[in-house]
Image (tube, rainbow, N blue to C red):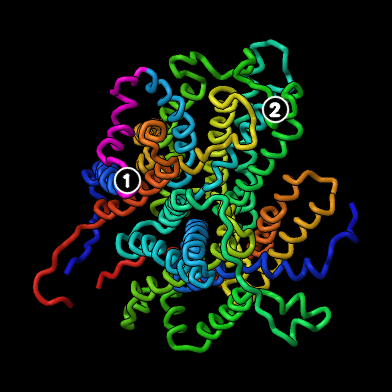
Amino acid sequence: MIRLEKRPNPSKAWSYSTPLLAVLLTMIFGGLLFAALGKDPVAAIRTIFYDPLLGQHAFFYRPQLLVKAAPLILIAIGLSLGFRAGIWNIGAEGQYIIGALCGAGVGLAFYPTESFIIFPLMVLAGALGGWAWAMIPAVLKTRFGTNEILVSLMLVYVAENLLRGMAVGLMKNPEGFGFPGSRNLAQYPSATSWINQNAGLHWGVAFALIAVIFAYILLTRHMLGFNIRLAGQAPRAARFSGVNPTRLVLFCLGTSGALAGLAGLFEVAGPAGQITTDFNVGYGFTAIIVAFLGRLHPFGILLAGLLMALTYIGGEIAQSQLQLPAAAIQLFQGMLLFFLLAVDLLTNYRIRLKQGAAA
Amino acid sequence: MDLSSINWLLLLASLMVAATPILLAGIGELVVEKAGVLNLGVEGMMITGAIAGFAAAVESGSPALGFLGAAVAGALLSMLFAVLTQFALANQVASGLALTLFGLGLSSLMGQSYVGLKPPSTPKLDLPLLSDIPVLGPVLFSHDLMVYFSIALVAATWAFLKYTRAGLTLRAVGENHEAAHALGYKVVAIRCAAIAFGGACAGLGGAYLSLVRVPQWTEGMTSGAGWIALALVVFASWKPWRVLIGAYLFGGITVLQLNLQAAGLKVPVEYLSMSPYIITIIVLVIMSSGRSRGALGAPASLGRTFHATG
């Protein structure tokens, strides 16, 4: 008979090793899945995890790693603040879209003026857009007690429809021969977020690193970070110590919204280039996995973001080389979160094999 | 715009069809939440049910087997959530999200060879006398069996929760799992059963989308229906009949919005398509404002992890 015994304190060792264990389990079960699909499991895992880093064409894939990881890290950092405090922003995908729309809107409005002020203005608009979109669930929660999970999620579908409306309407490229989609911002020097396209460097990468450091300082050195952690671990104690829950909700949702908005802006002005009807590719949802995989810790998220980017790039290679379906990678990522949540048990509980008669 | 071009009778009739998927998923989630578990994976279970039901119906040629397959698939998937939350004691919110992400991936993988196919048509129930009644006939009595099944399910759930001993036990587990455990009820087993029921219902709802409402398979075809079902439970204040009312209200909005598009309302399609989601938010605000969770009727143990220490 197996019995669980709660640990007095979460185990440090397990808390570091569970993400690795989860990745390992995902590889094993993912391999089984690939085998079930009739692919060589070893080759598939190798293609996904090894080839983009150290394979023959790695020099080509490594820069892409940064490009994919940047939005994931940026969004996940924001989400992790809220998750720590028990505030569930699940609508990062929507905030990402609105950030892209606002930022791109500013950029398109100035076309074809050349000025160094345009890009900073776009960044500001992107952050503000994402922030404002996240403020809707935040204000509804603090004013009316509405569930932020459901509201932020509903707003994803609203944002997706808004995106479609913009891509075929207001933001459509007048020189686009009637095709849906805006002008390509990556080809508009004053509005592009690329720093060095060959090296995979754009402003999003820089901001992602800044966000990691900023979040680390906030969480370990600042009162606000302490309050966030306290509100998550002991809500009643937090109230007694004078933590204002309303302000915390506004701060956490606002920050994660602004970061998601920034991610959207950097993406549309760089790697994506334009507003299209299906511009969003689910980074807002994948970032949830990244946040948990990184144990809601800034540096953990940095690593988790890079790992998740690896599965994207590797997945694309596996698609073209092994004809592995794109959905398999999505399933793979979902599986990772499952295993992570399951093995987390080891952090908080001891597993005891009970001797003798079971009670 | 030409409002007279809308056939209001047809609109009322299609309202019931539009409402059925979220009604099924909603009533399932109601039972889960009554047992004190918050499963946010409805969307994932629905979409898995949609493709599983579609595949089963296409392969067997029988819609009935399709619905059965969908229910089984939804229940099986929900067991992953049950293992995570009831045995591995994982956070319910995170586990539910994991279930949705996993279900979305799983469904698009399973659905690859089914894109563009047509499912066998689900026969309409032909009630000789009833469906001939002038106005009521076409609106109320000319649907397929699942529409009536969903209503019967609401009635059965209501009666189960209100009048049976097992229903009382389930509610007790949802209100206070410590006390229920002390009384000797198997909290984890009861919760697992509720989760499986919720999964089966969500699967049925998904299959109704892919077999009757749309009827075809497209990736991501639930597009938020599962989340709306979750909102429906809040709207209903955890009362079965109100889930029915809410689902029909919501179905009405969806159908009206589609009809307005067809009637040529001078608003782009994309903006009209937002309306169901915006209205859901507004409804959530109205339902939540000024009331605590308890006053709303939420089970007291909702979302809390249970770990038997004794």
B59 left or right of B20?
Answer: left
Residue A42 locus on image (x, y percent): 25, 38
Q: Residue at x 31, y 82 (%)?
A: B184
- Which x, y percent locates residue B36? 45, 70
How far across and down, in percent of the image, does residue A280 sit?
A: 57, 37
What residue sits right under mark 1 in the picture? A38
SS at mark 2 in the image: helix
Mark yes or no: residue A238 visible.
no
A40, above or below B23, in the image: above
- The label shown at residue A105 is 2
Q: Which residues are magenta?
A: A36-59
**Res. B207 visible in picture:** yes
Is residue A190 left or right of A319 when viewed as pictured? right
Looking at this view, name the residue that lies furthest to the left: A356
Question: Residue, x 39% and y 41% (percent of image)?
Answer: A296
Give B125 or B140, whichever is nearer the viewer. Answer: B125
Could you tell which of marks 1 and 2 lies nearer the N-terminus?
1
Q: Which image quarter holds the N terminus of chain A? A: bottom left
Say which amino acid is labelled 2: Gly
- Asked if A335 appears above or below B141 in the picture, the reply is above
Q: Amino acid at mark 1?
A: Gly
Whether B218 is drawn above or below A70: the answer is below
* Spot occupied by residue A295 in the image (x, y as percentages of width and height): 35, 42
Q: Residues within 10 Å of mark 1 (few under 14, many from 20)?
A: few
Q: Is B264 covered by the magenta stretch?
A: no
- Rate crowding at label 2 as few (under 14), some (14 to 19) or many (20 or more) other CA atoms within 10 Å: many
